[in-house]
Every structure is written in C-alpha cells, then in structure tokens.
Amino acid sequence: MFELDVLVAIYLCGWAVVTVGLYVAGKRLAERGSAAARTLGVSVLGGALWPLLLVGVVEASSIVVLTKLGAKTTPQMGVLA
C-alpha cells in the first residue's frame, strides 16, 4: 500500500500542476480589455480541488461517449390485435 507521505506528495504535485494550468488558461482565455481580478485565487482553489475536477472530467467524458453511442434498437415482439 501507499504510505501517507507518498499520497500527500502526489496530491501536492497535482495541486501545483493544476494551479499553474488554470492560471495560464485564465490569463490566455480572458478578453484583452478585461483582466480577471481574482485569477490567482481561483486557480489556487481549483488546484486544491483537483481530484473533484478530475472526477468531473471523467463523468463528462462518459456522458459524451454514451450520447455518441446512441440508443440501440432491438427488434421486439409485438402483439398484433
């Protein structure tokens, strides 16, 4: 099993990577005339919650995959009256 210090190290590395990614994305995707005032704070908060963001991405991608598959139509037996 993993030891606690390994899990903490994985969490902190993920926090750092997600924080930097969110900060860069927030600065790059903002409109030129309006700079977001709380980009760093939101990035740090998003970085702290990165496991939840990961679960959300997995759930969203599974929904997309299921909608692309569509409903399977199977021939059914019906009763003709």
Image (cartoon, rainbow, N blue to C red):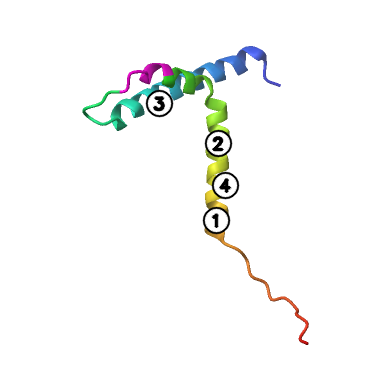
* Image point (42%, 16%), residue name: 41
Tell me residue 7's x, y (percent): 61, 18
Q: CA distance from mark 1 to mark 2?
A: 17 Å
- Distance from disc 3 to disc 1, alpha carbons, whole Å, reads 28 Å
- Residue that numbered label 4 is attached to: 62
Specify the label residue 56 is tagged with: 2
Mark 4: secondary structure: helix
Q: Residues within 10 Å of mark 2 (few under 14, many from 20)?
A: few
Query: What amino acid type should be assigned to the residue bearing mark 2?
Result: Gly
Of the two numbered discs 1 and 2 on the same chain, state the one appearing first in sequence.
Answer: 2
Look at the image and give the residue range highlighted in magenta.
36-41
- Looking at the rendered structure, the secondary structure element under dot 3 is helix
Q: Are marks 2 and 3 in contact (CB under 8 Å)?
A: no
- Alpha carbon distance from label 2 to label 3: 15 Å
| Kind of residue indicated by mark 3 | Leu
Question: Mark 4 is on which residue type?
Answer: Ser
Is the residue marked by circle 1 packed among few (<14), some (14-19), or many (20+) residues within 10 Å?
few
Q: Which mark is residue 22?
A: 3
The answer to the question of whether label 1 and label 2 lie on touching residues, with beta carbons closer than 8 A, is: no
Image spot of residue 29 (x, y percent): 31, 32
Look at mark 1 in the image and give the residue it sits on: 67
Chain-order first, disc 4 or disc 2: 2
* Image: 15 above or below 73: above
| Label 3 vs 1, first from the N-terminus | 3
